[in-house]
Amino acid sequence: MKRNRTAALCCAALLLLGLSSCGTDTASSTQHVVTLVSKSTQTEFWLSVFAGAEAAATEYNVKLNIVGPETEEDYKTQNQMVADAVAQGTEALVFSAIDYENNADAVDEAAGKGVKIVAIDSNVDSSAVSTYIGTDNYAAGQMAARAALERVKGRLKVGIINYDISSANGQERQRGAEDTFRESGRAEVTAVINTLAEAGQAQKDTEALLNEHPEIDVLLAFNEPTSVGAAQAVEVLGLSEQVFLVGFDSNVLTIDGLQEGSVDALVVQNPYAMGYLGVESAYKLLSGQGGGLEQTVDTSTRIVDRSNLFSIDSQKALFAFEQRED
């Protein structure tokens, strides 16, 4: 990890995102211990989350530990990571749940031992969560559906590529999209699949879906790996002109696809803000400043397509700050 960023660079980065006043007197002399338990450590989305978390840890003098499973389906490993973090003395968890229900007991047990809980990206079924920071996922699903409805004429036959059915944010995105399509009166959701949050498997499953349902002319994919896989499937099958693909998040492959035609629009979240605000909120809870925390903090989301791809705001959203290295 690059931990020797200058204060000026951190301030510039945070000011671009509107996240911090870059004050020099916000951190206390007591170094609190915070553990961020992510859903993955491999995707560009999570690397951006980590960058934001590390910037906040530097500003607030927090000792930050970052852990996560190898796959976005492994909630059992997440639960063990929570238990291990508590045993090692963490004071707060910044947590993104793989499984809304099956991660709850581990979080409740940690809270029962005095650990403060902040949820980011994907919430967990626990009353111990002090604040949730992330995308309004229902609204993001609506945004994805409207991106297709506004850009594709006539009646639409829609295929949805979702990930783990137990993930709260994926299900909320699907519900928002389905409601919007239904209310439009000119779109039919032809098929929905749940696949692994892994690009290779998502590609195989998307190819099978499109072969089984050649009538599909709109695809929605709801996170970074499924979007990469769906874009690769559209390209391999030669359907860039026939299928309008709306993906989620920023990845070099989907950005290339946006330029080349296999991707038509991206719903871009703000993972940097999730990481930064997650650690900041943990610090406030530990330092007695948690009274003013909002129960839900909606981080910004925007649509990027070929018409605005090279705008300054889109470039900031697509190419988030990365401050980690192996």
Image: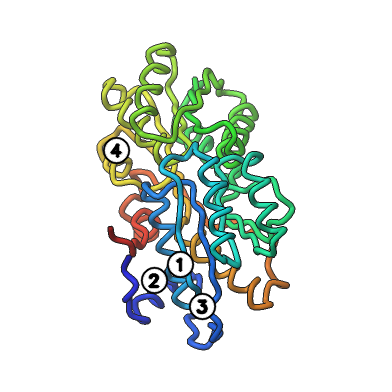
Density class for disc 4 (Cα within 10 Å; few <14, some 14-19, many ≥20) is: many
| Residue 115 in the image, given as x and y percentages of width and height | 65, 63
> On screen, 124 above or below 172?
below
Q: Earlier in the sequence, mark 2 or mark 4?
A: 2
SS for dot 1: helix
Q: Which mark is residue 13?
A: 2
Which residue appears at 50% of the width and 26% of the height? 194
Asked if disc 1 and disc 2 are in contact, CB closer than 8 Å, the reply is yes
Q: Earlier in the sequence, mark 3 or mark 1?
A: 1
- List the residue tagged with mark 4: 257
| Residue 76 in the image, given as x and y percentages of width and height | 54, 40
Q: Which mark is residue 17?
A: 1
Which residue appears at 50% of the width and 31% of the height? 162
**C-alpha separation, residue under disc 3 versus residue under disc 2:** 16 Å
Q: Earlier in the sequence, mark 4 or mark 1?
A: 1
User: What's the residue type where badge 3 is placed?
Assistant: Tyr
Q: In front here: 1 or 178? A: 1
**C-alpha separation, residue under disc 1 versus residue under disc 2:** 7 Å
Outermost residue toward the front in this view: 87
| Residue 131 in the image, given as x and y percentages of width and height | 66, 60
User: What's the residue type where badge 2 is placed?
Assistant: Ala
User: What's the residue type where badge 4 is placed?
Assistant: Gly
- List the residue tagged with mark 3: 60
Density class for disc 3 (Cα within 10 Å; few <14, some 14-19, many ≥20) is: many
